């Protein structure tokens, strides 16, 4: 995801549009597809479900998810119009239908409980802690590091568990699962 400075929001990748053409080739080189496959498996998608991919960037996960699960509706959300243009072309080339919307994870432009699953891959590091918390709280409408589970719990998730981890060239990537608290 390449964040833009817009309405007071910014991310680590802000103003780095020149890197966008290298995002997908670097991802292929680093084996991001295997991480996406594992995330898709962890989501346990079923026909008829609606999935929101927050911080979809160039759409790699969203397109891969739809290709693997043609009976699932996939919507990708990202604030960067240039990344979304790449995502739309990628979906068209793959001949899969994925809707891509411009927006922020902490201000979702969707009705409450609109999705059965929400995914996000390799984007939380672009957000400051307050924005991460806001995004996770907003998603409720719809790692060995204990801080991750604590942030998810503080955002209103329960039964948060680390389900897998992988080493990458840039460090470890952890997969967490949690469910919406019944008290919310």
Image: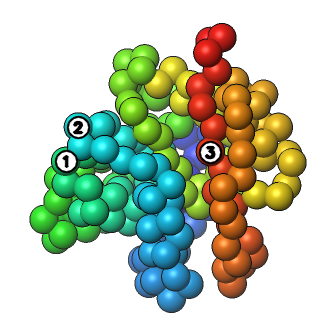
Q: Quadrant of residue 157?
A: top right
CA–CA distance between discs 1 and 3? 23 Å
CA–CA distance between discs 2 and 1? 6 Å
Residue 7, placed above or below residue 124: above
Closer-to-camera residue (55/184): 184
Residue 96, placed above or below residue 106: below
Labels 2 and 1 touching (C-beta < 8 A): yes
With 78 as the anchor, is 163 left or right in this view?
A: right
Residue displayed at 85% across by 46% down: 147
With 145 as the anchor, is 87 left or right in this view?
A: left
Q: Quadrant of residue 169?
A: bottom right
Q: Quadrant of the C terminus?
A: top right
First-in-chain label (2 vs 3): 2
Residue 47, placed above or below residue 158: below
First-in-chain label (2 vs 1): 2
As drawn, the residue found furthest toward the left would be 95
The residue that disc 2 covers is 48
What numbered label is drawn on residue 177?
3
Image coords of residue 158 (percent x, y): 70, 29
Asked if residue 157 shows in the view, the reply is yes
The residue that disc 1 covers is 71
Labels 2 and 3 touching (C-beta < 8 A): no
Secondary structure state at the residue bearing disc 3: strand
């Amino acid at each position: 995801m390449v964040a833009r400075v817009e309405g007071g929001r910014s991310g680590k990748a802000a103003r780095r549009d020149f890197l966008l053409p290298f995002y997908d080739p670097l991802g292929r080189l680093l084996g991001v597809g295997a991480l996406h496959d594992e995330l898709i498996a962890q989501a346990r998608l079923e026909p008829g479900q609606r999935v929101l991919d927050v911080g979809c960037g160039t759409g790699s996960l969203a397109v891969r998810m739809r290709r693997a699960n043609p009976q699932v509706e996939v919507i990708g959300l990202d604030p960067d119009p240039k990344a979304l243009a790449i995502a739309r072309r990628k979906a068209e080339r793959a001949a899969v239908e994925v809707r891509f919307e411009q927006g922020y994870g902490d201000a979702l432009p969707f009705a409450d409980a609109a999705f059965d699953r929400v995914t996000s891959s390799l984007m939380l590091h672009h957000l400051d802690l307050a924005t991460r918390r806001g995004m996770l709280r907003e998603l409720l409408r719809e790692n060995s590091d204990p801080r991750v589970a604590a942030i998810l719990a503080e955002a209103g998730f329960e039964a948060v568990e680390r389900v897998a981890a992988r080493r990458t060239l840039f460090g470890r990537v952890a997969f967490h699962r949690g469910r919406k608290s019944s008290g919310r």
